[in-house]
Image (cartoon, rainbow, N blue to C red):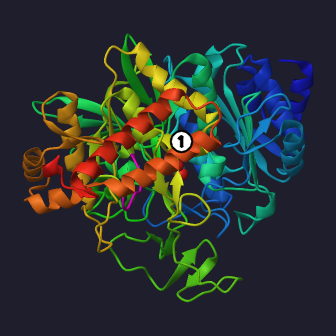
């Protein structure tokens, strides 16, 4: 180790931590940690390896520091974030540090690199005085695999470090094997000034991404979506790396769907946050590989995907024994669970939609809470947040697929794009081919906003591949990469669109929460050519008889022809209006849109107009 770094470390690290850092013979790493120490000025630095003792220590410190409080069930803790300003991903203050001679296009939030660095480093200066700094090593994707990306996380939050233990694979031993290589991601986080253990300086919250060095800074925030570097922050760096290296980094679940005769077919699915992604991956009877992030590579002509993570940072609202029995069991049994932004009474966590009445008083993110309590602006404070979360290891789940750690991932049979769409798309349909699916479903994805990000809810927004928030390359390049991916495949996965949120004219949902269990079975059959379909202008629709059989098989439910017609009627006007919105985006807001995007959209418009001319505005699937 260079003497100048050794000097910095000797002043702050005890002998075991120093030994762990020295064993990693990596100049870039030593420089990154030394810079963080000098900048943030912690009292001490704890370097953790992969050993259970170090991990247990972090867990204990999170409680001793009061970032987490133990609950009555053994292994359960609760953590709170600033209310109302730190309860979701903060897109406004998440920016790319862009050098003067580069541009990411006008769709991405950017700040000039030098000015941004000065600002965020200014907020980090001395931020860890009186605190301990934690240095942790993890791996994105399975270790020792073509998918693996090593990461180093520095944070002054034991809650962040603890969350990462549940969510990611240990990476210290893998880091050792890197030698002096520099191809890994670096994250530096400080919770900033705390009041009652909660980040207080919300006006100084910043999440800045220095893609030129693969370093991400996050300060004055605790919400895991802004602080756990390996989650949505790493996704941005991964999208750039994938672009350079010819693979894909996606905001997608990975799951195995059971088909006839013990067959398992793997699907991935991109849905904006809080639109059914986790609950699809958790459909009873199927197998989860991951619920949020997937890397794809073409291996021997086959599309293969891994779960980047090994845990779930999931939305707890509406998790109840009926809707999510497997997760509910984990959340109510002894074992490691971090709850965040729920209400606590007598050591028990409460959340909206848990299938039980919430107490009228307790402790939450404002401290002591009681019904009717108002905040400084006169608004009533809710007992729990709609974006309250749980953090668990996937290994606690009874339905975990055995392939989670397969270094070559799983073969992908189908890709699903889903959104929260109350009035336009049918519940499930299949694209005509790869380009149609990528363009008319993935790149045309719209969804109504939810509590997972700060800001107004229920606003219809464009969110291509549900990855827009994390894009770190120009949109047109990202679409091109998705289109091109199929050229290295012998048989590209089929592409589907799903919509669990379609409403009737009375404003009521047309489908039950569990109907998605039927849709995935239909898709599984389609992948193997074992179900017929009807050609609509927007894609291939299921046949009534197949769904009737599957509703009986999966849900033991009699599916009526009337329900089928209501759900699968093509809403021509609404579909045309959507095409117009998407067309405008690609014509006006995106530079260098690949011409095939406009061609596929135009062909879809033509098909819809022809249907309108022949059959009117609302066309039953039985008339197609
Ligand atoms: C998440 C998100 O937490 O996308 O996964 O917000
Ligand atoms: Mn997500």
Q: Answer left or right for 548 relative to 506.
A: left
Q: Residue 369: image x %, image y %?
A: 58, 82
Q: Which residue is drawn at 67% across and 20% down?
A: 183
- Which residue sits at x=34%, y=60%? 501
Q: Is residue 31 left or right of residue 242?
A: right
Q: Name the residue under label 1.
A: 467
Q: Is the magenta stretch mostly helix, strand or loop?
A: loop
Residue 397 picture location, percent across and down: 33, 45
Q: Is mark 1 within 8 Å of ligand 2?
A: no
Count of marks overlaid on the render: 1
Picture residue at 66% right of the left edge, 82% below the top: 375
Residue 609, x across and y down, in percent: 33, 47
Residue 535 sits in which quadrant? top left
The span picked out in magenta is 418-423
Which image quadrant: the N terminus?
top right
Was residue 470 drawn as part of the magenta stretch in this picture?
no
Q: Which of 265 and 599 is in front in this view?
A: 599
Is residue 3 something that shows in the picture? yes
* Residue 420 among those drawn in magenta: yes
Q: Is residue 201 visible?
A: no
Q: Is mark 1 on a helix, strand or loop?
A: loop
Q: Nearer the viewer, residue 488 or 381?
A: 488
Asked whether 130 or 232 is in front, the reply is 232
Residue plotted at (91% across, 28% down) = 7
- Along the horizontal axis of the image, is 351 left or right of 376? left
């Amino acid at each position: 180790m260079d003497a100048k770094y050794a000097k910095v470390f000797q002043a702050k690290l005890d002998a075991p931590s120093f030994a762990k850092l020295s064993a990693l013979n990596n100049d870039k790493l030593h420089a990154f940690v030394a810079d963080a120490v000098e900048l943030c000025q912690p009292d001490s630095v704890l370097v953790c390896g992969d050993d259970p003792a170090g991990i247990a220590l972090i867990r204990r410190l999170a409680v001793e520091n009061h970032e987490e409080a133990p609950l009555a069930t053994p292994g359960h803790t609760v953590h709170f974030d600033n209310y109302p300003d730190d309860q979701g991903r903060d897109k406004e203050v998440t920016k790319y540090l862009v050098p003067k001679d580069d541009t990411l296009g006008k769709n991405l939030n950017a700040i000039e690199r030098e000015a941004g660095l000065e600002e965020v480093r200014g907020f980090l200066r001395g931020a860890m005085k009186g605190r301990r700094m934690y240095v942790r090593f993890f791996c994105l994707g399975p270790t020792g695999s073509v998918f693996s990306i090593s990461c180093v996380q520095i944070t002054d939050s034991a809650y962040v470090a603890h969350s990462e233990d549940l969510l990611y694979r240990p990476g210290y031993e893998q880091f050792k094997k890197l030698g002096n290589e520099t191809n890994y991601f670096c994250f530096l986080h400080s919770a900033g000034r705390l009041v009652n253990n909660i980040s207080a300086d919300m006006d100084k919250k910043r999440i800045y991404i220095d893609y030129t060095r693969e370093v991400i800074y996050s300060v004055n925030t605790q919400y895991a979506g802004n602080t756990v570097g390996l989650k949505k922050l790493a996704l941005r760096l991964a999208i750039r790396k994938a672009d350079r290296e010819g693979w894909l980094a996606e905001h997608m679940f990975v799951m195995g769907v059971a088909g006839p005769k013990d067959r398992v077919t793997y699907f991935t699915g991109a849905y904006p946050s809080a639109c059914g992604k986790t609950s699809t991956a958790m459909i009873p009877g199927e197998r989860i590989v991951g619920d949020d992030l997937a890397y794809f590579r073409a291996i021997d002509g086959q599309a293969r995907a891994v779960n980047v993570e090994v845990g779930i940072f999931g939305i707890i609202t509406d998790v109840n024994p009926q809707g999510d029995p497997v997760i509910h069991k984990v959340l109510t049994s002894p074992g490691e669970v971090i709850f965040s932004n729920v209400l606590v009474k007598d050591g028990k966590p409460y959340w909206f939609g848990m299938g039980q009445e919430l107490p009228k008083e307790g402790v939450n993110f404002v401290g002591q809470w009681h019904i009717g309590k108002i905040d400084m602006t006169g608004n009533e404070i809710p007992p729990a947040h709609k974006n309250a979360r749980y953090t668990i290891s996937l290994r606690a789940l009874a339905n975990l697929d055995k392939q989670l750690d397969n270094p070559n991932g799983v073969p992908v049979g189908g890709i699903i794009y889903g959104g929260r769409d109350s009035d336009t798309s049918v519940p499930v349909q299949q694209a005509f081919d790869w380009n149609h699916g990528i363009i008319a479903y993935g790149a045309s994805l719209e969804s109504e906003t939810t509590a997972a990000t700060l800001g107004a809810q229920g606003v219809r927004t464009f969110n291509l591949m549900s990855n827009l928030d994390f894009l770190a390359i120009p949109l047109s390049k990202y679409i091109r990469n998705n289109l091109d991916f199929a050229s290295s495949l012998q048989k590209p996965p089929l592409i589907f669109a799903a919509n669990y949120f379609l409403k009737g004219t009375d404003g009521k949902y047309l489908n039950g929460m569990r109907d998605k269990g039927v849709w995935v079975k239909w898709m599984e059959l389609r992948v193997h050519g074992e179900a017929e379909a009807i050609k609509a202008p927007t894609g291939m629709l299921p046949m009534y008889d197949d769904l009737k059989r599957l509703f009986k098989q999966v849900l033991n439910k009699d599916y009526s022809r009337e329900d089928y017609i209501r759900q699968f009627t093509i809403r021509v006007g609404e579909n045309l209006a959507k095409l117009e919105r998407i067309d405008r985006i690609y014509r006006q807001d995106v530079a260098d849109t690949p011409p095939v995007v406009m061609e596929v959209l135009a062909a879809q418009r033509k098909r819809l107009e022809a249907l309108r001319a022949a059959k009117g505005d609302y066309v039953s699937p039985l008339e197609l």
